[in-house]
Amino acid sequence: MCAERVVSAFPSIAVRRAGACLLLAIAVALTGCTGLPRGSYDALRLAVSGRGLDITPEQVAANPYAQILVEGPQGESLMVLGNDDAGLTSWFTPDRRIVFLRDGILAGTSGQSTDAIEIRMLGDNPFKRLASVESAQTHRRYDWMPGYRYGVELRGQLQRGALESIDVLGSRRELQRFDEHLEGHGLTAHNRYWADPHTGAIVRSRELVGPGVELQITVLKPYTPGAPR
């Protein structure tokens, strides 16, 4: 079973219950794939993680796969796209960390001190039309591990801010900032997004994973469906 079938067989389970075993299963399955000399196994091998990564534009350009930089309490990870399951994209590192994205925002994690097994947008999703949003309400449901804290609902207010100049691999980009204030179940959080002002594509975000844990995600090489992953 090759990478795409392995991951697509898991998405609902992976986002709800995945842990280290999922990535191990994927890696084992990938090693059994043939006819993919530059396929998903190579993408996983090219991902790196650590503290103080020195990533250059040349390195990103030389890697044919879509890439994101994820920064959090456990350091930095250069993640590569392993799968797209109907818009749920899965990004991997070799050290058992996974980030799931949908519509450019966080949909789940594996390998953090607190994991969002699933983050589901309920009702209207303003991130599908971000380029035209001035203000919108949001409603999410979080499932957290450890502790089996499932069904935690947070409501938020998303507000367009100012254009800001953001550094991405040494290049300045003028991006539209959005702020989202979340609260519920005694928890408050502040998500931030920087998006292309014309398309609404999110280039950088700082998002809640779980209590006391947030990740900064920067798109280094965007994924286009149909292009190499």
Image: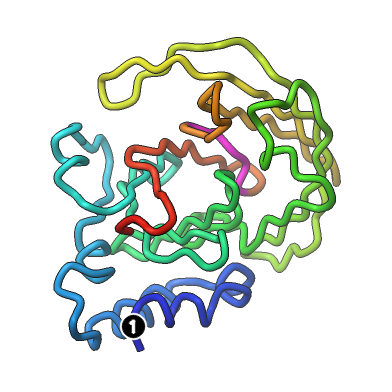
Residue placed at 50% from the left, 76% from the top? 8
Q: Is residue 161 above or below residue 226?
A: above
Callout 1 crowding tier (Cα within 10 Å): few <14, some 14–19, many ≥20: some
Residue beneath disc 1? 2
Q: Position of residue 85 (x, y in %)?
A: 52, 68
Residue placed at 55% from the left, 24% from the top? 198
Q: Is residue 207 magenta?
A: yes
Residue placed at 63% from the left, 74% from the top? 12
Q: Is residue 166 above or below residue 104?
A: above
Q: Which residues are magenta?
A: 204-209
Q: Position of residue 174 (x, y in %)?
A: 45, 14
Q: Amino acid at mark 1?
A: Cys
Dividing the picture into quadrants, the one containing residue 207 is top right
Q: Is 119 or 85 nearer to us in this picture?
A: 85
- Label 1: element kind: loop
Could you tell me what secondary structure mostly forms the magenta stretch?
strand
Relative to 78, 217 lies left or right:
right
Q: Position of residue 151 (x, y in %)?
A: 80, 61
